[in-house]
Amino acid sequence: MTLKKLDANPSTLKSVLEQLKSDETNRSKINFILFLADNDPTTGQSWCPDCVRAEPVIYKTLEESPEEVNLIRAYAGDRPTWRTPAHPWRVDPRFKLTGVPTLVRWDGDAVKGRLEDHQAHLPHLILPLLAPST
């Protein structure tokens, strides 16, 4: 149906999530956060090969859904930034990221479903995340 993409980084994710929550038109939509690696400025491509593989599959699967979907693309930074054990999304108890890409279904203020880096490129695993919340 409709896929709306919003972008965030470690310093803006909180405000993007608050904006999403405060907009009443989003109450009927399914919300996802896709944690990704930044693009390498020398190549224009993500430095993360798993992200390069998963991104088009995730977009296609979500775009083909009959549901209205918001997707926050949360860019984790360059390779050295992401590799830091103290990266904000590695230590945030809501996310506890171990790899990128990671796709999470976000309902209210909590993760309601999750695909790790080795799963995020598989449409048959993405589709169940689109099921109505119970």
Image (spheres, helix red, strand yellow):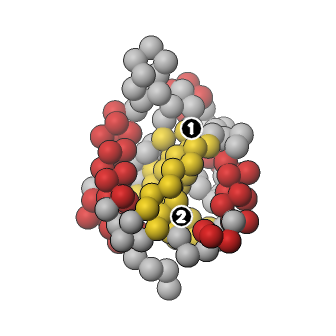
Task: Give 119 or 62, whichever is nearer the viewer.
Answer: 62
Q: Residue at x 38, y 39 (%)?
A: 51
Mark 1 surroundings within 10 Å by alpha-carbon count, few (fewer than 14), some (14 through 19), many (20 or more): many
Asked whether, in this view, residue 60 is left or right of residue 37, the answer is left
In front of the other: label 1 or label 2? 2
Q: Which residue is drawn at the image coordinates 60% and 68% (left, top)?
A: 26
Q: Quadrant of the N terminus?
A: bottom left
- Residue 128 vs residue 6: left or right? left
114 or 6, nearer to the observer: 6
Asked whether the beta carbons under mark 1 and mark 2 sit within 8 Å of each other, the answer is no
**Mark seen at residue 31:** 2
* Residue receiving disc 1: 76
Q: Is residue 39 above or below residue 4?
A: above
Mark 1, secondary structure of its residue: loop
The span from disc 1 to disc 2 (Cα, nearest Å) is: 19 Å
On the question of residue 131 being in view, the answer is yes
